[in-house]
Image (cartoon, rainbow, N blue to C red):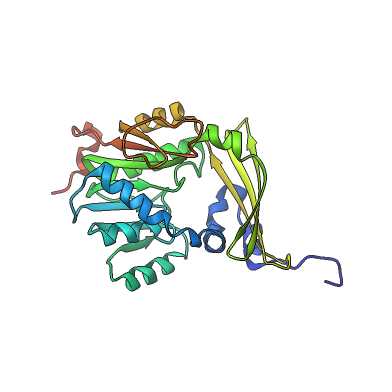
Amino acid sequence: MKDGTARRTPLVEERRRVPAEEWWRTEGGFFLLTEAHRAEEGPKAAAFLEKVLRLPPGSRLLDMACGWGRVSVELAAKGYRVVGVDCSKVLRLGRLLAQQRGVVVDLVRGDMRRWSCPPVFDAALLWGMSFGYFSDRQNVEVLRHVGRSVRPGGRVVLDLHHRDWYLANYLGEHVDLVQGKVSHDEATFDLSGGRLNILSTVADGQGKVLARQWHSFREYTPEEVLSRVRSAGLEVASVHASLEPRPCPPGPADSSWQVIARRPRSLRPTERGLRTA
């Protein structure tokens, strides 16, 4: 531009009005530019969940922070009754995709820090690094709320970054081509806060910036995750590496790992009022 200022995209303008600690409020549109092509990850996640949970069709599942429903739609296609919750407007895309697939999935807009319900679900998911957006206290509170949404004996599944892999392999700059667009990530790690911070930029083939997005994840060690699972009143049932159905801890080559937690069958006195008829 003649005055030397760069033209800002709507996503960048929206980001300027959002506090850094609530970066995820503007992630939806950016996600579609950079992640929608990874639709094949939905079937992989659904296949893993089907094997490890072993729930019959018709079971009730909660997909918290579901995004556009990549996993929710696949689980619904397998015959599960799924509720997906997310704060993003991209839920509209999920509803459209579910309609095109001919499946029924209830996608609800809400803030997972405040969303709660009676314990009616057989299992609940915090998938795709949905655990770790907030402060340590809020992260445990989210996990506690999600745990209380499942029936006694029900499971809660966490899909997580493997901190050691990201520290060894992801810090610095990364450039990729994504469906004709250039994706540039600059990742740093805040040792004092234990957070992985990523500034992502997407540009077209001519170098025009289409969108920028700030991401910040609290990266816990495996021991810290399991401690917080227990702090939320859940029991650790099994640990898996990179969607391996057989229990095994994550190793140096694993970028992700999964925790299957269980809500105790005997409720504490303070939780008995949550029982459903």
For the question of whether residue 96 can be seen, the reply is yes
Estimate the x, y position of residue 35 in percent, counting from the top left. Answer: 52, 58
Estimate the x, y position of residue 186 in percent, counting from the top left. Answer: 67, 47
> Image height check: is 97 above or below 121?
below
Estimate the x, y position of residue 218 in percent, counting from the top left. Answer: 53, 38
Is 153 left, or right, of 214 in this rendering?
left
Looking at this view, is 213 or 87 the one in front? 213
> Image height check: is 187 above or below 60?
above
Estimate the x, y position of residue 184 in percent, counting from the top left. Answer: 66, 53
Which residue does the image show at 78% across and 65% down from the upper left? Answer: 6
Which residue does the image show at 39% across and 56% down from the upper left? Answer: 42
For the question of whether residue 115 can be seen, the reply is no
Q: In which quarter of the image is residue 201?
A: bottom right
Give the residue furthest to the left. 277
Q: Quadrant of the N terminus?
A: bottom right
Looking at this view, is 64 or 118 the one in front? 64
Is 233 left, or right, of 216 in this rendering?
left
Q: Tell me how many marks there are.
A: 0
Which residue does the image show at 62% across and 46% down from the upper left? Answer: 198
Is 249 left, or right, of 15 in this rendering?
left
Which residue does the image show at 38% across and 72% down from the upper left? Answer: 96
Looking at this view, is 58 or 178 the one in front? 178
